[in-house]
Amino acid sequence: MSFSLPRYLAPDFAALGLDQAPDAVLLPAEQDGVVPKGYHATTLFPEYYRLNGAWVLAEDSRMDCVAVVREGRLRIVEFRNVKAGDLVVTGRTEDGSEGIYINPNCFADETGERESFAFRTGRSRETAYSIDYDELYQLLRHEREHGNILWVMGPACAFDADARAAFAALVRGGFVNGLMAGNALATHDLEASYLGTALGQDIYTQKPHYNGHYNHIDTINEVRRLGSIPAFVRSGAVTDGIMYECVQHHVPFVLVGSVRDDGPLPEVYGDVYQGQDAMRELVRKATTIICMASTLHTVATGNMTPCYRVAEGGVRPLYFYSVDISEFAVNKLRDRGSLSVKTIVTNVQDFIVHVRKGVGAD
């Protein structure tokens, strides 16, 4: 099976009768974080705005933001990041009549037919996923050479010896360009190498260690004593695993905390908006995103991920996967507006092991 990117179907504004459409109406923001009435809220699809008589594609979009012209440049900005004086695009129509045009279902498959971003409905634990795995292996091989692969992981990914080893191999093999998670994933992965347990349970035999409930806190405490996860790795306290390989191979990671966190680890963002900004910096670079067993982080990532990426002078799809053993978890993401997601209902530990074997990572 060979892989090729779908062709982008750019709108023909002349054929649409929009070559003489009016410019989008821009109104200034009166104060920081407050937009004018009638603002246009962005979507995950490619959006064009008519500015100074020309249609301009928003290159870095996401859902539920606003388009602003700042220093002569079109930007997509979160509401909280709007600055007083920013010129905000207004208008509630999306057919070009107000200088705003949205281009959904904009990629062609191998036959030239338009692809829908609602890949498939009703995917469940009974769905046959063989073709999805094979397509994913081809995609990851392509992206290793031509794209940027971002992974979003819940702590279940660190609870199993084989899953940790498989993801570590993916890092070494060049299939991981960024990692986003919470305090728990990093803590239990480091605990696994440092003390052989995750939440006090042996990561292979599943047997609890005596006083094992201290292990994750002991791990956090030692990392905090040394000052950072990289310092903990350099100390020799850990010799394998997810975080170890990310540090060794200079893979950027963003850890965003929650109200239930222990410790937390030094790198964990306690301010959710600072964490969201840091996550978005990694999302901006990604061309494929794979989310595993973390409903809140997955939905958060989905809300900041468009269905396309402008790269190498063209427009290409941004591939988005959600993998979880819970049908509720993967369906929640689709219900929250991330129509471009492809879902796989399975155990994420098994999923990681399959992916490692499928791409041939050592």
Image (spheres, rainbow, N blue to C red):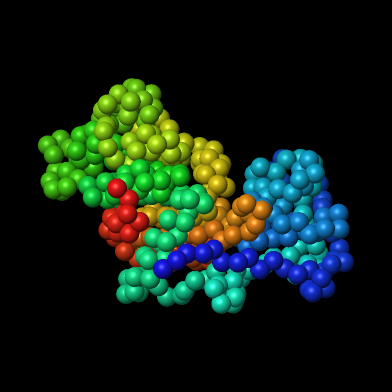
Given residues 160 and 15, the one toward you in this image is 15
Q: Residue at x 31, y 46 (%)?
A: 169
Q: Is residue 273 visible?
A: no
Location of residue 22 by image quarter: bottom right
151 relative to 115, above or below: above
330 relative to 180, above or below: below
Residue with the most extreme front position: 2
Horizontally, residue 12 falls left or right of residue 362, namely: right
Q: Is residue 137 visible?
A: yes
Q: Residue at x 45, y 60 (%)?
A: 139
Given residues 74 and 173, the one toward you in this image is 173
Quarter of the image where the N terminus is located: bottom left
Tell me residue 122's x, y (percent): 42, 75
20 relative to 70, above or below: below
Horizontally, residue 85 falls left or right of residue 152, namely: right
Location of residue 281 by image quarter: top right
Location of residue 97 by image quarter: bottom right
Q: Residue at x 38, y 29 (%)?
A: 230
Horizontally, residue 331 falls left or right of residue 45, namely: left
Q: Residue at x 35, y 43 (%)?
A: 172
Tell me residue 321's x, y (percent): 44, 60
Tell me residue 181's x, y (percent): 41, 45
Q: Please give the count of numbered marks on the rendered protein.
A: 0
